[in-house]
Amino acid sequence: MLLKKADIILIIILLFIALAFNFVFLNLMGGGGEVVVFYNLGEYARAPLNEEAVIEVKSSNGTVINEIVIEGGGVHMSGSSCKDKVCINQGHISGTGQVITCLPNKVVVEIVSGGKVEFDSIVR
Amino acid sequence: MIRLSGNRDIALYAVFTSLALVLSYFEAMLPPFIVAVPGIKLGLANIVVIIFLYLRPSKYALFINLTRILIMSVAFSGVFGLIYSFSGAILSFLVMLIFKKSNLFGIIGVSTVGSVFHNIGQIFVAAVVLQSSKLFLYMPVLIISGVVSGIITGFIAGGCIARLKVGGI
């Protein structure tokens, strides 16, 4: 007997388990990303991606030049003292490796993965 | 211990062990299906294991698979992966045996749990060896790929078993 009714039920259950695992693990372990803010080529601030926060970048004379908002698992630039506002128009980013740049103010916001991912060719 | 009953049986196990070896070697030569996701494989050698599970006393199925893994790792893939493959093979065999003995499931069902638990066994050992629970993030991918490859290999094994029975093996 090649395929019985129980087989089809089994396959559906396995697929559901896979989806459930996916959901649980993404909630438990995911969101490990971090937002890194660079100002003037140096690291200025670092914050976890999954907690809402507002980061203000201040220039050397104390005035706030950029305002960065972390919310909903992503980050966007909400305010900037520069003229062209390209950084604000870059919108909301949430993927690892994505970058928002404000060139006039020398501010770069980057999303990096927080935990080190340890997959390699051993898993075969 | 494994006790073979005659020349015919010895020849039969040798031929099927070589078949399993050729299948894994062939599979190792195939380009990866999805390059970004390592670890996904068809598990063609499982076809031979399932054939023996159904046509011979089941311990020979395990015996053939362990022999295959030993020779494959010594000859091609390196002894380092041996512990992963062995644990995957043993867990997969035990689960397939239980499912087969229950008489509830067809060959495709047995083959599917076999593939899935081969992957799960490897993940567990890898998580212990590498001390990293992050590997379990990989579980959904491996379960789904196990289901797909299990259906394919089960289908092929079912066809082979029907024909081999006619041939009187």
Image: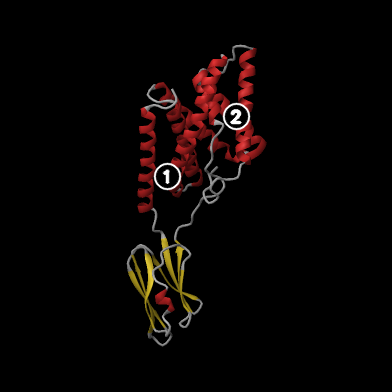
Residue B6 drawn above or below residue A67: above
Residue A13 picture location, percent across and down: 36, 37
Disc 1 is placed on an element classified as helix
Q: Is residue A38 above or below residue B2?
A: below
Q: Earlier in the sequence, mark 1 or mark 2?
A: 2
Q: Chain of mark 2?
A: B
* The label number, if any, that marks residue B20 in the structure image: 2
Residue at the spot 39% in from the left edge and 58% down from the top edge: A31
The location of residue A83, given as percent across then percent down, is: 42, 85
In the image, what residue type sits under mark 2?
Ala
Residue that appears at 56% across and 24% down:
B63
Q: Which quadrant is home to the N terminus of chain B? A: top right
Near-viewer residue (B113 or B136): B113
Q: Residue furthest right?
A: B75
Q: Circle 1 is placed at which residue position?
A: B140
Which amino acid, by three-letter code, is at mark 1? Pro
Q: CA distance from mark 1 to mark 2?
A: 27 Å
Q: How is the image coloured?
A: secondary structure
Quadrant location, the C terminus of chain B: top right
Question: Badge 1: few (under 14), some or many (20 or more) residues near its Cα, within 10 Å?
Answer: many
Q: Residues within 10 Å of mark 2 (few under 14, many from 20)?
A: many
- Give the secondary structure at mark 2: helix
